[in-house]
Image (spheres, grey):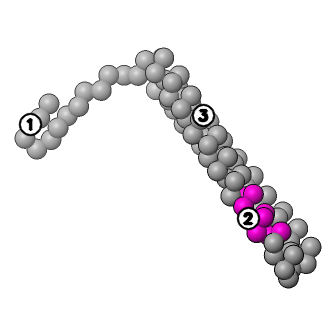
Amino acid sequence: NNDGKLIRLVIPPLTGERRQQLVKILKKMVEEGKVAARNVRRDYNDKIKNLEKESFSKDDCKKGQDKLQEKTDKIIAEMEKIGTVKEKNILDD
C-alpha cells in the first residue's frame, strides 16, 4: 500500500519449512565466520613464527601464540552463542 508518504508491505508469517531453511543459512554463516577466524589465526601464527626467526625469543612467541589462541577461542564461542540465540529466535517466532 502506498499512501503518498509511506509504503506498507504486507509480509506473511514464516512457515515451518522456511524457518528451517533460515536456520540452515544461519548455521552456514556461523561456520564461515569460524573458518574466517581460524584463517586469521593461522596467518598471524605464521607472522609470529617469522618474528621468532628474526629477533624474538621462543618464549615471547609462545606467549603471543597462546594469547592469539585465547582470542580466537573467545571469538568462536561468541559466534556460536549468537548463532544459538538467533536460531532460537527464528524457530520461536
Name the residue at 62% across, 46% down: 33
Q: Nearer the viewer, mark 1 or mark 3?
A: 3
48 above or below 34? below
Rate crowding at label 2 as few (under 14), some (14 to 19) or many (20 or more) other CA atoms within 10 Å.
some
Q: Secondary structure at mark 2?
A: helix
Q: CA distance from mark 3 to mark 2?
A: 26 Å
Q: Is residue 10 visible?
A: yes
Q: Amino acid at mark 3?
A: Lys
Name the residue at 73% across, 64% down: 44
Q: Amino acid at mark 2?
A: Tyr
Query: Which mark sits nearer the N-terminus, 3 or 2?
Result: 3
23 above or below 42? above
Rate crowding at label 3 as few (under 14), some (14 to 19) or many (20 or more) other CA atoms within 10 Å.
some
Whether pointer 1 and pointer 3 mark residues with C-beta atoms closer than 8 Å, the reply is: no
Most common secondary structure along the magenta stretch? helix
- Percent from the top left, x then y, of residue 42? 75, 57
Q: Which contiguous range is marked in magenta?
A: 41-49
Residue that badge 1 annotates: 3
Name the residue at 67% across, 46% down: 35
82 above or below 72? above
Query: Which mark sits nearer the N-terminus, 1 or 2?
Result: 1
Q: CA distance from mark 1 to mark 3?
A: 39 Å
Residue that badge 3 annotates: 27
- Percent from the top left, x then y, of residue 12? 32, 22
Residue that badge 2 annotates: 44
Left or right? Give the position of 14 relative to 5.
Answer: right
